[in-house]
Amino acid sequence: MTWTFTDDVDVFLDAAGASLAARPAENTLVLTVTATLRRDGPRAYGDAAPLLGWWRGTDGGVGGTLVQTPPHPPLLGAVVPEAVGPLAAALPLTRINADRVTAEALAAAWPGHRVDQEQRLHRLGTLIPPFPAPPGRPRAAATADRALLVRWHRAFADEVGQGAAHAERQVDERTASGGLTLWEADGVPVSMAGASPRLAGMVRIATVYTPPEHRGRGYAAAVTAEISRAAREAGAQEVLLFTDLANPTSNGVYRRIGYRPVSDRLLISAVER
């Protein structure tokens, strides 16, 4: 009952891929990060090599996964309770991104801790498009939109406290795959939403952004409903998204169009007392 670590994404997925795919909602972040590492190489997120780990129980099954892509903190997928203690013993953790129960269990052994971010994972139930719909229409993003999309990705990253170092790559990949949708009003883009590639039947909606001058008119709800509909019609069995629990407005928007809570995640850091 030990954790095994590697910097080789293929070795990791050979060991843990089936376990990740069996629970795509709980493992959505690990699935998308490892897909990016497999596609773009081990330096996809930074100059340092990634750290990937999995834990096996007495039955030989994988009961926990971890991915760290420096400078980002370690990210846990679904982890059984009995794997938490061995993880703390195996790695000198001072920061973690995990489901609420696991994060709090790890932080209990630290001298002190602070919660840097609380997120809630939502799953699409019955889609409820906004009615009446706001003025305008959706359309797929195109290469001609690149400068605008990069600017909006960077603005989104600033607002949510994330790095925007890979905005250009993200825009290019999502545009090429049809994973970016714009809402236009009077021929002018006023909002956008992105979607991850389908993995294990799962698509995650991300980077929903409306510039401040266009907010409060229902554009975000409309573009999110449209990209969610397209994902489901294209075959996604799970359509997911994360919200920041500190933003009641966005949480309300997604509830109204049919998203329902699944679980909470914490980004948590150790502090000295």
Image (cartoon, grey):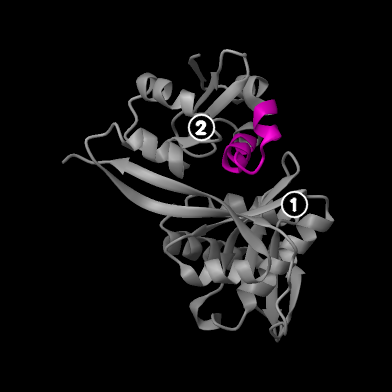
Residue 12, compared with residue 44, is above or below; it is above
Q: Is residue 71 visible?
A: no
Q: Inspect the image, locate mark 1, and give the three-letter code of the amino acid beneath it.
A: Ser
Under circle 2, the secondary element is strand
The residue lying furthest to the left in this view is: 273
Q: Position of residue 256 (x, y in %)?
A: 64, 71
Q: Is residue 53 left or right of residue 176?
A: left
Under circle 1, the secondary element is helix
Q: Position of residue 208 (x, y in %)?
A: 59, 64
Determine the main secondary structure of the stretch shown in magenta.
helix
Callout 1–callout 2 Cβ contact below 8 Å: no
Say which of 245 and 33 sits in front. Answer: 245
- At label 2, counting other C-alpha atoms closer than 10 Å, the crowd grade (few under 14, some 14-19, many 20 or more) is many
Q: Is residue 104 magenta?
A: no
Q: Which residues are magenta?
A: 18-36
Please give the name of the residue rendered at 71% of the width and 68% of the height, measured from the top-left corner: 225
Label located before the other in sequence (1 or 2): 2
Q: Is residue 216 visible?
A: yes
Q: Is residue 45 left or right of residue 73?
A: right
- Which quadrant, please, contains the C terminus? top left
Residue 37, compared with residue 229, is above or below; it is above
Residue under label 1, please give it. 177
Q: Is residue 111 left or right of residue 269?
A: left
| Disc marking residue 118 | none
Q: Position of residue 135 (x, y in %)?
A: 70, 86
Please give the name of the residue rendered at 45% of the width and 67% of the height, measured from the top-left corner: 247
Residue under label 2, please give it. 67
Q: Inspect the image, locate mark 2, and give the three-letter code of the amino acid beneath it.
A: Val
Quadrant hosting residue 30: top right
Whole-angstrom CA distance, mark 1 to mark 2, is 25 Å
Residue 263, compared with residue 84, is above or below; it is below
Q: Nearer the viewer, mark 1 or mark 2?
A: 2
